[in-house]
Image (spheres, rainbow, N blue to C red):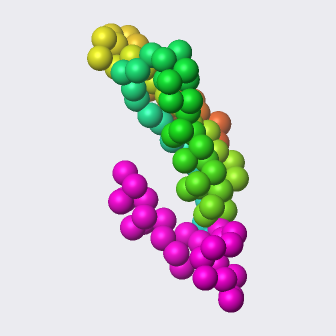
Amino acid sequence: MKGWVDRVLREEVAYIFPKEDNGGGLPIGLLKAKAALVFNTSNTPEEREQSVFGDPLQRIWKDCIFAFCGVTAFERKMFRIIADSTPDDRRKWLEEVRETVADYFPAEKKE
C-alpha cells in the first residue's frame, strides 16, 4: 500500500511545500475531497491489536496521509475476524459500509 500511496498522493498532486521549504516543514494540502473513508479487514482480535500494536493504521491514514494532503474529515472502520466470518457477518459489514458512505456522501436528488 505504501508504494501506491506514494505514487498517487504525491507532491504537487496531493500536497506542496511552501516556497523555500525543502520538504522538512508542514505541507499545504491540495486535495479538495470532502472526506476520506478507509475500510479495513483483519484477522487479529481487536484487544490483541490494541495491546500489542496500538492502532498504527489509524494514525497513518488519518494524520500521515489524509491530513497531510488537506483532508480533515476522516473515518476508518475495521471489520474482523474475517477468517471465520459468516455470510451474515459480511452482509452486515457491507451494509455498514453503505450507511457510512451515504452519511458522508449523500446522493444528490435529481429534479
Which residue appears farthest toward the bottom when viewing the image?
20
Q: Is residue 17 left or right of residue 95?
A: right
Q: What are the residue bounds of the magenta stretch?
A: 1-29
Quarter occupied by residue 4: bottom left
103 or 5: nearer the eye? Answer: 5
Vertical comparison of 74 with 13: above or below = above
The residue at the point 56 percent across, 56 percent down is: 65
85 or 4: nearer the eye? Answer: 4
What is the tally of numbered marks visible in this picture?
0
The residue at the point 43 percent across, 59 percent down is: 5
One can see residue 46 in this view: no
Residue 4 forms part of the magenta stretch: yes
The residue at the point 55 percent across, 47 percent down is: 60
Quarter occupied by residue 30: bottom right
Q: Main secondary structure of the magenta part?
A: loop
Quarter occupied by residue 43: top left
Vertical comparison of 79 with 40: above or below = above
Q: Is residue 85 left or right of residue 11?
A: left
Which residue appears farthest toward the left when viewing the image?
83
Vertical comparison of 98 with 14: above or below = above
Estimate the x, y position of residue 40 in percent, counting from the top left.
44, 34
One can see residue 5 in this view: yes
Estimate the x, y position of residue 14 in percent, counting from the top left.
55, 69
Estimate the x, y position of residue 44 in percent, counting from the top left.
40, 21
Vertical comparison of 33 with 76: above or below = below
